[in-house]
Structure formats: C-alpha cells, structure tokens
Image: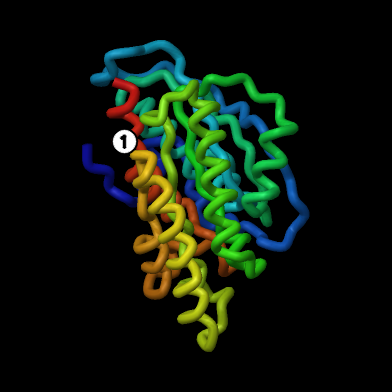
C-alpha cells in the first residue's frame, strides 16, 4: 500500500491538523509516559488474517514520545493507525520513552517499568542523546546490543516482531548552527553505522529514516516549531515505512 504524506492523510488517520505544528523541547524535564489511552476503533474491512488485538511497545527517547506533540502524532501512534486501516486490531501503544534519554536511561527505565510481555510489536529508536552528550561509540555498541536483546525478549523472543529505526539527523534543523552541522551529521552516521551493523548481525528489521530527516534542510514543514524535533508530517513518513513491515510480520 502506498501512503501519501499529506495533510489529507493526517485527517484520514484521525490526527488533528494542529498537531503538525506542536513542538518538542529537548531540554525540558524528563517525563515518562507509559501508556496512551487512545481508543481502539473497530478496523475497516482490510486484508488482515488475524483480527485478535495486538500489542505494541515503543522504546526510545524524545523522537518516540514526541514530547510536545499530540499523542496521535507520535510515530508509533501513526503506525498503529495505518495498521488499523489495514484491518488489524492494534491496542494503543505502550511507551517507555522520554526526552533526553540515552541508552543507559532507557535500560534503567525498562528495568523498573511495569511491563506485561510478550508484546506483538516492539520498536526501538535510541542513541541521539548518546551522541549529543559525546558518549563513546564503543560503549554505545554494547549498550545498544543489550537493549536490542531486551527488545527481543519483550517480544516473546520473536526477532521478526522487533523493529529498529535509525537515529534522525538533527543537524538539518535550525537548532544546529551552520558551523557545526557537518560534524554533527558525521557523528550521527557513526552511531547509525553501529546500530545498523548490530541489527544486520541479528537479522532485525532496520528502517533508515535518517535521509528523510535531512530533507528538513529544505522543507521547514518537517520540523516542529521548536526548531529541533520532527513535525507530525515527518513522523508520518516514518510510520509509512514501518507499517508495511509490521503488517508482514503480523500476517
């Protein structure tokens, strides 16, 4: 199924138009949102072969929680909405994510969270704050690998149900001064080389969203009003990459 990234599409999956303009603040206090009580609508006729309710666990940082973005504009929520259009019954995503989290923060939060595995779908997007805080890439490899192993465990040891996204390149946003854009972009590539390699070794689904985020250099509609985080339109592009992969895994 081809998804048209447009204002019309946002309306079709139930996202109010104002959500594409709501901002995320990188330096605001950490806030854990473990559950979003978005109603699960009866799915339209689709080609889903299993109509039992599926659960979705979203692990990450500000890009997963979309701190100041309307809950329906977060990429996990938009992905779930697209799957519902295909006929799947998807419960509201469970989030373990917060602005400013590194791999260490996420690992600690998973340990203390009241989770109820196995989850039918698990997404993992983590690492931008490791780069932002100048963390060592070697340590990132070991921490990311540990988080990936935990994600597989939370999926009920079903690697095909785990979906990793690459780290967005925030150097394309106004937040990063021109003099530092090239270096930040290079470092993002270093971290993404690591998480991609780890996923390839484990045969884990990997969605490279980084090129899409670099389009923000010439398309301001893809950036939230804080000048740093993605808009709802950019998150929809990620959802459009994930939904077909998750659909295939669920069938």
Q: Residue at x 36, y 54 (%)?
A: 208
Percent from the top left, x then y, of residue 20?
Answer: 50, 53
From the image, which quarter does the N terminus lie in? top left
Q: Residue at x 62, y 60 (%)?
A: 129
Q: Establish if 137 lies above or below 112.
A: below
Percent from the top left, x then y, of residue 137?
Answer: 55, 63
**31 left or right of 207?**
right
Mark 1 falls on what kind of element? helix
The answer to which of 198 and 248 lies nearer the viewer is: 198
Percent from the top left, x then y, of residue 97?
Answer: 63, 43
Q: How many numbered callouts?
A: 1
Q: Establish if 181 lies above or below 22.
A: below
Q: Residue at x 66, y 67 (%)?
A: 133
Q: Which residue is mark 1?
A: 245
Percent from the top left, x then y, of residue 207?
Answer: 36, 48
**120 left or right of 207?**
right
Tell me if I can see residue 29 in this picture: yes
**Residue 11's image quarter?**
top left
Q: Establish if 54 lies above or below 204.
A: above
The answer to which of 80 and 17 lies nearer the viewer is: 80
**63 left or right of 220?**
right
The answer to which of 227 and 109 lies nearer the viewer is: 109
Q: Residue at x 56, y 77 (%)?
A: 176
State the colouring used for the structure image. rainbow
């Amino acid at each position: 199924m081809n998804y048209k990234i447009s204002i019309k599409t946002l309306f079709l999956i139930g996202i109010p138009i104002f959500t594409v303009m709501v901002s995320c603040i990188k330096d605001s206090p950490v806030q854990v949102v473990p559950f979003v009580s978005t109603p699960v609508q009866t799915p339209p006729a689709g080609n889903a072969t299993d109509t039992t309710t599926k659960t979705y666990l979203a692990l990450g940082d500000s890009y997963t929680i979309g701190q100041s973005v309307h809950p329906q504009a977060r990429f996990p929520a938009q992905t779930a909405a697209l799957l519902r259009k295909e006929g799947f019954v998807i419960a509201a995503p469970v989030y373990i994510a917060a602005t400013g989290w590194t791999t260490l923060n996420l690992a600690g939060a998973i340990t203390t969270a009241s989770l109820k595995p196995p989850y039918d779908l698990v997404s993992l997007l983590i690492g931008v704050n490791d780069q932002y805080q100048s963390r060592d890439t070697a340590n990132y490899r070991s921490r990311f690998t540990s988080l990936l192993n935990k994600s597989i465990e939370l999926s009920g040891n079903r690697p095909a149900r785990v979906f990793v996204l690459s780290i967005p390149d925030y150097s394309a946003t106004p937040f990063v001064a021109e003099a530092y854009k090239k270096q930040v972009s290079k470092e993002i590539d270093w971290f993404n080389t690591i998480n991609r390699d780890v996923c390839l070794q484990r045969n884990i689904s990997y969605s490279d969203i980084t090129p899409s985020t670099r389009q923000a250099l010439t398309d301001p509609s893809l950036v939230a009003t804080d000048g740093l985080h993605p808009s709802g339109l950019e998150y929809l592009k990620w959802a459009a990459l994930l939904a077909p992969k998750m659909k295939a895994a669920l069938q």
